Image (cartoon, rainbow, N blue to C red):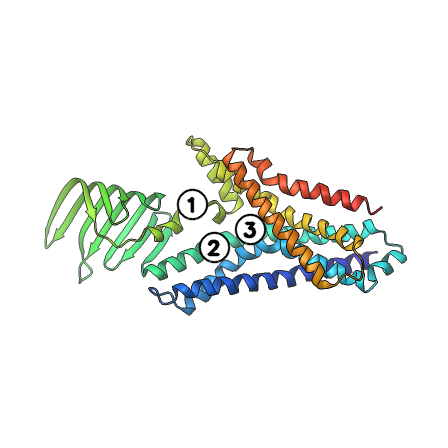
């Protein structure tokens, strides 16, 4: 039975990875066509587009893995059924539940891969992709350090310590250099607001350096003519989908300690916990489809079934999560209820195979 277990596991894994490659290729193709609309804006060329696609691929793999597992299992197990291999295994003494157990082992491997990608690969790669695209489009250089966010706008260097929203900044320092790269002025503002056309600095102090003389000035408000784009700062705003599980947990604690609502972050955290198990559940769904549908069913028909079910589950899962935010449901329930419902249905269908 060990040989059969390894064979079934390898076939299911191979099918899942081939399906992932196909789905990611399709996703990247459609993304590429969308990005062509911004080709030539700023420094955004083909090199930047392909780099953006490469960096966003891990996130796409993570999102598509459950659907790929379902498609791969339907095609692979369906092929084994069409070639009478599953029947030969049962004739050799392997029960249907031993076949299910082998599929579950493959699902556990895929779940571990999904968790690793979500925790260590996808978040930093997605943040880098967004930063690369935005800085190329806006022709501005930006970086994130432990001392805040640094943006270069020609000879002006801007340090931002707080970004509440992309149009609401706090603790801003602005340094202007002359042609000889000597410091001309340094300005610190308590906050900055964007009104749709320009920035307005609040509670600012400016020091100017000329020859050996330093002058300072304090004002309550002033217009800021920088071309700093709010869209550029958007990549630095905390987005739950771009954080790892550990970062989400820390962010949840931070919001709770400061008395802020954390329902969206809580939901993102529990979705991150549940998602690897979605891949396993999709494999369980594939088993009764294969073992109860006629062996003469074509591969195309199985793909249609997989795409329809996978897309339907994805939409239902997303819709249920949004409803959970609207009606302030328990985030654990909002994140896990659709997966639990499908899991119960799959187990019931497998139990009927007896």
For the point 39% across and 49% down, the residue is: 236
Disc 3: CA contacts within 10 A as few (<14), some (14-19) or many (>=20): many
| Residue contact at pointers 1 and 3, CB within 8 angstroms | no
Residue named by callout 3: 118
Give residue 58's position: percent from left, percent from top: 54, 57
Q: Residue furthest bottom?
A: 46
Residue named by callout 1: 238
Which comes sooner in the sequence, label 3 or label 2?
Answer: 3
User: Which of the image's four quarters has the N terminus?
Assistant: bottom right
- Does 238 appear above or below 79? above
Disc 1: CA contacts within 10 A as few (<14), some (14-19) or many (>=20): few
For the point 57% across and 40% down, the residue is: 320
In the displayed structure image, the side of residue 285 where residue 173 appears, left or right = left
Give residue 159's position: percent from left, percent from top: 29, 49
Give residue 157's position: percent from left, percent from top: 26, 54
- Secondary structure of the residue carrying tag 2 is helix
- Secondary structure of the residue carrying tag 3 is helix
In the displayed structure image, the side of residue 314 where residue 297 appears, left or right = right
Give residue 174's position: percent from left, percent from top: 24, 50
Q: How far apart are the two marked residues, 1 and 3, measured between alpha carbons?
A: 17 Å
Residue named by callout 2: 126
Quadrant of res 6: bottom right
């Amino acid at each position: 039975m060990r040989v059969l277990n390894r064979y079934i596991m390898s076939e299911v894994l191979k099918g899942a990875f081939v399906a992932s490659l196909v789905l990611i290729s399709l996703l990247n193709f459609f993304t590429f066509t969308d990005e062509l609309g911004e080709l030539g804006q700023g420094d955004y060329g083909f090199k930047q587009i392909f780099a953006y696609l490469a960096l966003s691929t891990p996130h796409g793999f993570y999102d598509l893995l459950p659907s790929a597992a379902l498609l791969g299992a339907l095609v692979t197990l369906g092929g084994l059924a069409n070639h009478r291999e599953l029947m030969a295994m049962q004739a050799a003494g392997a029960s249907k539940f031993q076949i299910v157990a082998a599929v579950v082992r493959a699902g556990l491997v895929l779940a571990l891969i999904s968790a690793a990608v979500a925790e260590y690969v996808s978040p930093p790669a997605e943040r880098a992709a967004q930063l690369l695209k935005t800085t190329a489009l806006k022709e501005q250089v930006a970086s994130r350090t432990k001392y805040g966010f640094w943006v270069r706008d020609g000879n002006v260097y801007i340090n931002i310590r707080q970004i509440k929203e992309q149009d609401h900044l706090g603790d801003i320092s602005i340094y202007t250099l002359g042609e000889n790269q000597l410091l001309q002025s340094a300005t610190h503002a308590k906050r900055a607001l964007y009104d749709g056309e320009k920035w307005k600095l609040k509670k600012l102090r400016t020091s100017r350096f000329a020859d050996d003389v330093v002058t300072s000035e304090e004002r309550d408000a002033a217009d800021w003519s920088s071309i700093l784009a709010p869209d550029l700062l958007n990549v630095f705003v905390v987005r739950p989908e771009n954080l790892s599980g550990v970062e989400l947990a820390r962010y949840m604690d931070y919001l709770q300690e400061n008395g802020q609502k954390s329902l969206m972050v809580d939901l993102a955290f529990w979705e991150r916990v549940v998602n690897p198990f979605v891949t396993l559940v999709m494999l369980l769904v594939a088993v009764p489809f294969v073992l109860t549908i006629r062996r003469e069913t074509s591969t195309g028909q199985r793909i249609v079934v997989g795409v329809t079910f996978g897309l339907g589950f994805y939409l239902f899962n997303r819709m249920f999560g949004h409803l959970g935010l609207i009606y302030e449901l328990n985030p654990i329930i909002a994140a896990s209820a659709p997966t639990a419902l499908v899991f119960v249905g799959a187990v019931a269908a497998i139990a009927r195979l007896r």
